[in-house]
Image: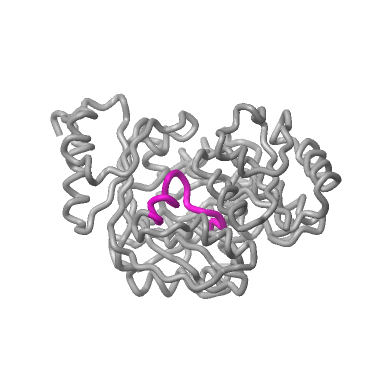
């Protein structure tokens, strides 16, 4: 079996997907823009073949690299990446090369927020009112229904890049005068807390693993106001979130795939409203947090599913696991050494955040776990406590 993994070196923990496949006897091939000798040793040991490309954003380069691997190693059974940035080009290549998985005819459902909204509505999943807008007239029609404020965001986009909160007609007109020349969705502002429904499905679309995370702020607020952030896994998933998460997986026909679904729980009524469906693992170290919360290895379980050796998989969410970030601009009450001294036994990871992610994920981050949620709250207050607050 040949599996090609695109960008296996980034994020750094993704080398484990390749390592677990190799352990199961799969022939693992890689494509990336890094020189072979600069890949971490564990990744080099996991790859049977590798092609370096000059420009990962050039489909022609990716196509040429994939063709070279096929010529040398034979037909490719799977083409994977798990990174949002590569979902569309990989879908194109799967269609061109006849490789199983999400093809180009399906990828729009996973990438375009307007198509996500249509699927949510077809399946009776609550979603914010709004839709695609081509001009000011379209936007004013939506505002007439929803009122202000409204959120404008790219139809295809990651995180909060290019997202705006608009409060009146003047801001709406300015938005259309300055917005990039890409499709935009305009929708009502939902005041609520973000809950995720994250997991992994098998070849029949059944959930193999699932969990939920609660976020201190939305990405838009964190990015636009340069805030630090934290988010915490739950040991028990609320019943209504579990039901909507399961329905969303069926709506998007997710098979042999990680998923990261986001919902608002509104402050006024407590109801759930869908935000977006991501058919990939949750970002940052969240996949590792899933493993830490239940003492499992989802890298291995995914590899077993891909290799056709799923087996029985049982788990228990034994811990709350939390990601807590800091921004260097803030005058924090406690230094790094004091944090390690106070919570050293609970901290599983701590690291500087890659600059490309720091606006949304903080400059430095801690991942810790505890059996009791009160200990998570105490750690968050201690790590993010700021002078004068």
Span of residues in magenta: 277-291
- Which quarter of the picture shows residue 196? bottom left
Q: Horizontal and vertical percent for residue 128?
A: 46, 61
Check if residue 173 falls in the magenta segment: no
Q: Quadrant of residue 303?
A: bottom right
Q: Is residue 61 above or below residue 14?
A: above
Q: In this orientation, does residue 192 appear?
A: no
Toward the viewer: 251 or 264? 251
What residue sits 47% from the left and 47% below the top?
A: 283
Question: In the image, residue 193 lies at what x, y percent?
Answer: 33, 56
Instruction: Say whether residue 222 is visible.
Output: yes
Report the side of 14 relative to 4 (left or right). Answer: left
Q: Up-down: is 343 above or below 195? A: above
Q: Is residue 217 left or right of residue 102?
A: left
Name the quadrant containing residue 36: top right
Residue 354 pos. (x, y %) = 46, 31
């Amino acid at each position: 079996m040949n599996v090609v993994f695109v960008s296996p070196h980034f994020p750094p923990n993704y080398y484990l997907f390749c390592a677990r496949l190799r352990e199961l006897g799969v022939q693992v091939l890689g494509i990336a823009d890094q020189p072979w000798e600069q890949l971490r040793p564990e990744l080099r040991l996991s790859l049977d073949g590798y092609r370096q490309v000059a420009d990962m954003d050039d489909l022609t380069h990716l196509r040429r690299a994939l063709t070279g691997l096929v010529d040398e190693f034979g037909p490719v059974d799977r083409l994977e990446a798990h990174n949002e940035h590569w979902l569309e080009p990989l879908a194109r290549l799967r269609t061109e090369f006849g490789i199983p998985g999400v093809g180009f005819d399906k990828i729009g459902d996973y990438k375009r927020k307007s198509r996500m909204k249509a699927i949510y509505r077809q399946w009776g999943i609550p979603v914010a009112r709004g839709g695609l807008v081509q001009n000011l007239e379209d936007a004013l029609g939506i505002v007439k229904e929803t009122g202000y404020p409204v959120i404008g965001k790219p139809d295809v986009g990651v995180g909060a890049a290019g997202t705006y909160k608009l409060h009146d007609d003047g801001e709406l007109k300015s938005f259309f005068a300055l917005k990039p020349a890409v499709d935009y969705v305009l929708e009502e502002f939902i005041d609520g807390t973000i809950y995720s429904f994250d997991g992994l499905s098998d070849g029949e679309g059944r959930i193999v693993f699932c969990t939920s995370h609660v976020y201190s702020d939305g990405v838009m607020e964190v990015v636009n106001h340069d805030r630090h952030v934290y988010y915490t896994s739950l040991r028990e998933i609320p019943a209504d979130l579990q039901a909507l998460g399961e329905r969303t997986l069926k709506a998007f026909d997710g098979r042999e795939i990680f998923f990261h679904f986001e919902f608002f729980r509104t402050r006024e009524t407590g109801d759930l409203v869908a935000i977006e469906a991501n058919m990939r693992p949750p970002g940052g170290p969240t996949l590792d947090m899933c493993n830490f919360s239940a003492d499992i290895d989802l890298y291995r379980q995914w590899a077993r599913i891909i290799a056709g050796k799923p087996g029985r998989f049982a788990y228990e969410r034994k811990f709350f696991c939390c990601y807590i970030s800091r921004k260097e601009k803030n005058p924090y009450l406690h230094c790094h050494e004091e944090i390690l001294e106070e919570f050293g036994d609970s901290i599983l990871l701590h690291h500087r955040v890659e600059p490309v992610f720091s606006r949304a994920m903080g400059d430095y981050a801690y991942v810790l776990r505890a059996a009791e949620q009160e200990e998570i709250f105490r750690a968050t207050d201690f790590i993010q406590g700021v002078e004068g607050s």
